[in-house]
Amino acid sequence: MSTVAQELVRRKCAPCEGGVAPLTEAQVGPLLKGLPGWGREGLGIFKVYGFKDHYQTLAFVNAVAWVSHREDHHPNLIVGYNSVRVEYWTHAIGGLSDNDFICAAKIDALFDL
């Protein structure tokens, strides 16, 4: 796990009701670089996770739901038989916030448990 990811995992999401600017490209670059496998698309970030079977896929979806509930920051999930695409962006600000990267790092950390 990168130093950036380790720092993000230790943080807690802050409530975001809008009224703040999205992260700039200069801020996004280093955060994204610290999260291997995550890419940028449109307003958000995404990663596709692959699994052996449907059971593992759904177990991962449930773990993501648990993290999302604890952080009160929820991704879009596209679920297939043996893959899940996780997409984050902060709707209230129309772009990326620290919360997106905090949650992305926590989702990656599930594999270190």
Image: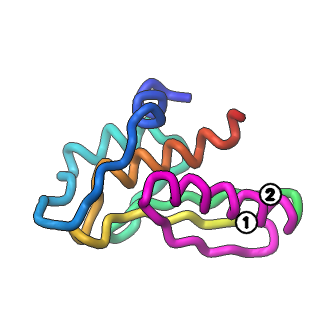
SS of the residue under disc 2: loop
Identify the colour scheme used.
Answer: rainbow
Asked where in the image residue 78 lies, by quadrant, the reply is bottom right
Pinpoint residue 15: horizontal percent, then vertical percent: 29, 56
Magenta region's main secondary structure? helix
Residue indicated by mark 1: 83
Pinpoint residue 53: horizontal percent, then vertical percent: 88, 63
Vertical placement of residue 107 versus 30, above or below: below
Q: Is residue 80 magenta?
A: yes
Callout 1, which amino acid?
Ser
Quadrant holding the N terminus: top right
Callout 2, which amino acid?
Phe
Q: Which residues are magenta?
A: 54-83
Task: Please state if 49 lies on the left or on the right of 96 as rendered.
Answer: right
Pinpoint residue 25: horizontal percent, then vertical percent: 21, 51
Residue indicated by mark 2: 51
Asked where in the image residue 11 lies, by quadrant, the reply is top left
Q: Is residue 97 magenta?
A: no
